[in-house]
């Protein structure tokens, strides 16, 4: 049909990793385009290797293709070598499924999961062959949509995106399809683009930035107000009430070339109420909605059989909190159908629920990497960020892991947190050193990799009012820590570039005026900014200066309680006064318990939408000091039963 | 027990790399429920042994794979294998045949001595091609330098160019048919193309055969198993 493949085939011999562009995944759906069907081009604004595993995109891909009135294909950011060829040869952005030109689609829907990809979004819109600014696009042009966690502050991209989707996409994607279908079948008459956008603005969870007026007073934002009476003053996020109704992806795509997270992924719950104050994901995805354990088991077993993967990840924001996690893990590892060859990884593992029991099960097949995230180096700091795990919690988890044969592990930390002192920063080195000491009891070559990220305050968190640390301050802390860590050979340290942290900060809490900066950086060639070899700090600082915008104002400044925030017209269900109180509690070093197992403190996420937590277990998981009514000052003893260690290689024949 | 199979790789899937294919095979064998033998150690891997790497982007009618199975298989099950595996492999990969390998057969990497290729010469003319083929065949040596472990290493390709003839690609484009040796190292089709005409861009290449030459007799890798079988049977009588 309208495939660009014959042209692309000649060119792919000239680029790195051409398998990125061929599609052909196991699980791919052959789309049947038709005049009455809305054609979605689902885009991930980074390379195929990063984007293919994205579960959100795959879920929407299946839901849309199951509909009679929609088709969906996928596209990823072409690497710089192919982009140069596409521009020279005048070939537009194409889908990897059937290699159709972007212009053959009605919607280009972009996943936004990180700020540093924003310039890639502009680049992909441009490669799609339409104007990058939404107000310059016409009735014949595709609609540009965006979803994902970053849309909770949509303003920096407001000039370029026709409509944003806030929250879970499973249900709203169908409602949007119906609006666009009606537009398409009515023939997209002249001037009707404006009309379809107005209709979309009425769909709950959809934000159409061109329907809102923004007013400023000097550098300060005064208000973001709807231009029309039928456009909502505040756009509420969408939440699917019950994950059991959405067992997606049913046919996870298995790529032919290597990608990140190259394994079966099964989402075990969505939402998190641990209440870590730095964590935007935990705040905006509430309440907790567990998938029934039986459904998890079915999705794991069917998925392994269908894909041929020998690794499955049980994903969520804190998988050890899943009710009955030990049983699901044990059932999978011990299922005879898996012949002892399937390994399980539990990303986002809280140390206070990592027991010898879990450790022993995990290492029965291949041992996967182990990462813990204490996030801060001292108990004081962990109270401030409300990550209430004690040193004892960490040490017993680490002991469990080393005793079960792990020799190295990764520890994640943040630096630049509110009221952080050098003592807190250096506490990271102390924790790491003590972990290595524990490891040496079991293995002489035990080591720990410390990974340090600069903290970026995010919208809809209690830290949204906090002034981010400067580049100089973050660099000073990183080097202070590096020098301390150097004294212990068992500890390696990696860190995130403080300059990249600054740029994330510009976009994280920026307003609509930051759009000019993003466009400027893109026009000057600043794509793939999350790739260190392409990151161009000066492009950003120069662009801020050219736009007459102050980094100090946008990034480093503490906000006051009465300040109008750029995302005030978006709602994640959280009451602003709850967040403010939590911010005050943080500064007073007061922790907050997990509401899953304790009374509600009315953050707004459940009550506002008339939904509830769905948690199978009425009690908190074994171990853990948070939400379990244990004494916070001492932490909980982790109840363990030492299991006999499986003989290495026993599974092989 | 070990089995050896031959498969073709055509179409879009040709842009996957040798490493990609190794992963695809592992998954597809598990999907098809073929019980493989695993290595020992901290991270056990299935025992699969691939032949000489096909350049990324190259097509092939003759790719080989040796699989060590966890159990003994009946000959009838082995003959069923190509159908089962083709169904679980991506579009473009067709498993053509499978045979049981007797014990002690050399690995593909060790045993294969040459490969036959068709190599496209994009935009050339019949006259230029004839002259360039003649020049390569007449050259006493064809020295190329490549870097290995940071040091320049010089090889002579000429003794490894066993056959070099004009041919046409399936769509009629001009190309050459070449049999290239693999010992002491495999000549890459791109190296031959550069020797013929360094100004040409990379076009299509397709591997037609892999050969095992023993005592002057050239056999295909699947036939090696059969030949050894015959000898053992004769010896047993």
Image (cartoon, helix red, strand yellow):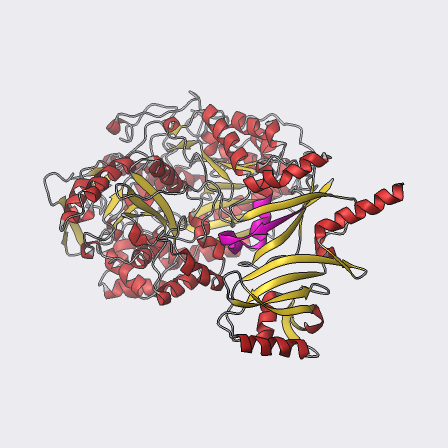
Horizontally, residue A331 falls left or right of residue A27, namely right
Locate residue B218: give its quadrant. bottom right
Q: Is residue B24 magenta?
A: yes
For residue A90, say whether it is visible: yes
Quarter holding the C terminus of chain A is: top right
Image point 53% across, 59% down: which residue? Answer: B57
| Main SS class of the magenta portion in the image | helix
Horizontally, residue A331 falls left or right of residue A28, namely right
Q: Residue furthest left?
A: A229
Locate residue A438: give its quadrant. top right
Residue toward you, A476 or B24? B24
Image point 51% across, 48% down: which residue? Answer: A256
User: In the rendered image of this protein, does residue A650 appear above or below residue A96?
Assistant: above
Residue toward you, A196 or A397? A196
User: In the rendered image of this protein, does residue A606 appear above or below residue A426?
Assistant: above
- Magenta region: which residues? B5-25
Horizontally, residue A584 falls left or right of residue B202, namely left
User: In the rendered image of this protein, does residue A389 appear above or below residue A408?
Assistant: above
Image point 45% across, 55% down: which residue? Answer: A478
Q: Position of residue B31 (x, y in %)?
A: 57, 37
Residue toward you, A83 or A378? A83
For residue A422, say whether it is visible: no
């Amino acid at each position: 049909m309208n495939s660009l493949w014959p042209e692309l085939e000649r060119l792919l011999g000239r680029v790195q990793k051409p398998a990125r562009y061929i599609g052909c995944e196991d699980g791919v759906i052959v789309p049947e385009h038709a005049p009455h069907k809305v054609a979605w081009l689902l885009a991930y604004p980074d390379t195929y290797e990063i984007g293919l595993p994205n579960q959100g995109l795959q879920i929407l891909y299946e839901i849309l293709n199951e509909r009679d009135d929609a088709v969906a294909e996928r596209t990823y950011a072409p690497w710089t070598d192919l982009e140069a060829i596409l521009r020279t040869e005048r070939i537009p952005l194409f889908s990897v499924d059937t290699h159709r030109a972007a212009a053959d689609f009605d919607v280009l829907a972009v996943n936004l999961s990180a700020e540093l990809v924003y310039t890639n979004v502009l680049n992909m819109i441009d490669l799609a062959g339409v104007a990058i600014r939404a107000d310059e696009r016409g009735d014949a042009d595709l609609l540009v949509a965006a979803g994902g966690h970053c849309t909770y502050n949509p303003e920096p991209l407001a000039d370029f995106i026709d409509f944003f989707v806030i929250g879970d996409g499973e249900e709203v994607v169908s409602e949007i399809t119906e609006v666009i279908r009606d537009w398409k079948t009515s023939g997209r008459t002249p001037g009707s683009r404006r009309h379809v956008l107005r209709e979309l603005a009425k769909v709950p969870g959809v934000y159409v930035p061109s329907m809102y007026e923004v007013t400023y007073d000097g550098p300060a934002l005064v208000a973001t107000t709807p231009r029309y009476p039928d456009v909502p003053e505040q756009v509420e996020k969408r939440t699917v009430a019950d994950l059991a109704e959405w067992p997606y992806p049913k046919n996870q795509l298995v790529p032919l070339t290597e990608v990140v997270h190259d394994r079966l992924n099964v989402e075990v719950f969505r939402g998190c109420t641990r209440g870590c104050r730095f964590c935007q994901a935990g705040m905006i995805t509430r309440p907790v909605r567990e998938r029934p354990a039986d459904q998890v088991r079915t999705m794991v077993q069917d998925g392994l059989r269908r894909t041929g993967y020998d690794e499955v990840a049980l994903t969520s924001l804190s998988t050890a909190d899943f009710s009955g996690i030990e049983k699901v893990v044990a059932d999978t590892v011990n299922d005879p159908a898996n012949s002892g060859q399937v390994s399980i990884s539990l990303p986002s593992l809280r140390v206070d629920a990592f027991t010898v029991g879990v450790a022993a099960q995990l290492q029965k097949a291949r041992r996967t990497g182990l990462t813990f995230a204490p996030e801060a180096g001292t108990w004081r700091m962990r109270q401030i960020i409300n990550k209430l795990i004690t040193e004892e919690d960490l040490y017993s988890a680490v002991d469990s892991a080393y005793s079960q044969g792990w020799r190295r592990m990764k520890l994640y930390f943040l630096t630049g947190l509110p009221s952080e002192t050098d003592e807190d920063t250096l506490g990271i080195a102390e924790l790491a050193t003590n972990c290595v000491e524990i490891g040496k009891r079991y293995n002489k070559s035990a080591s720990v990799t410390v990974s340090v990220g600069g903290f970026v305050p995010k919208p809809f968190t209690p830290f949204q009012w906090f002034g981010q640390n400067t580049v100089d301050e973050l660099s000073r802390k990183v080097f202070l820590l590096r020098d301390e860590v150097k004294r212990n050979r068992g500890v390696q340290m990696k860190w995130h570039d403080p300059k990249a942290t600054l740029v994330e900060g510009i976009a994280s809490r920026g307003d609509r005026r930051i759009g000019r900066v993003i466009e400027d950086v893109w026009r000057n060639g600043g794509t793939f900014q999350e790739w260190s070899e392409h990151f161009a700090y000066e492009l950003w600082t120069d662009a801020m200066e050219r736009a007459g915008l102050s980094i100090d104002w946008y990034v480093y400044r503490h906000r006051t309680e009465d300040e109008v925030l750029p995302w005030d017209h978006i709602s994640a269900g959280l009451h602003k006064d709850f967040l403010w109180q939590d911010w005050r509690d943080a500064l007073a070093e007061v922790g907050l318990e997990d509401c899953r197992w304790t009374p509600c403190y009315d953050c707004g996420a459940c009550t506002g939408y008339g939904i509830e937590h769905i948690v199978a277990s009425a009690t908190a998981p074994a171990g853990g000091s948070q939400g379990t009514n244990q004494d916070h000052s001492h932490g909980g003893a982790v109840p363990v039963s030492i299991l006999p260690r499986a003989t290495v290689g026993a599974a092989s024949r | 027990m070990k089995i050896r199979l031959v498969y073709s790789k055509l179409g879009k899937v040709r842009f996957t790399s040798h490493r990609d294919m190794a992963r695809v095979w592992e998954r597809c064998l598990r999907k098809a429920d073929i019980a493989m033998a695993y290595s020992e150690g901290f991270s056990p891997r299935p025992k699969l042994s691939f032949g000489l790497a096909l350049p990324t982007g190259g097509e092939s009618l003759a790719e080989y794979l040796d699989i060590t199975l966890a159990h003994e298989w009946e000959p009838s099950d082995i003959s069923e294998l190509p159908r089962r595996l083709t169904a679980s492999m991506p579009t473009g990969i067709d498993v053509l045949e499978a045979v049981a390998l007797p014990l002690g057969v050399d690995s593909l990497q060790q045993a294969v001595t040459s490969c036959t290729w068709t190599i496209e010469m994009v935009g050339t003319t019949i006259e230029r091609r004839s002259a360039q083929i003649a020049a390569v065949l007449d050259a006493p040596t064809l020295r190329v330098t490549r870097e290995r472990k940071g040091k320049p290493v010089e090889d002579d390709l000429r003794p490894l160019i066993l056959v070099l003839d004009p041919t046409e690609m399936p769509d009629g484009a001009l190309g050459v048919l070449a049999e290239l040796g693999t010992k002491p190292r495999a000549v890459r089709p791109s190296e031959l193309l550069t020797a013929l005409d360094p100004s040409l861009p990379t076009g299509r290449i397709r591997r037609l055969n892999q050969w095992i030459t023993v005592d002057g007799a050239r056999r295909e890798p699947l036939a090696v198993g059969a030949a050894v079988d015959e000898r053992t049977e004769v010896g047993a009588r």
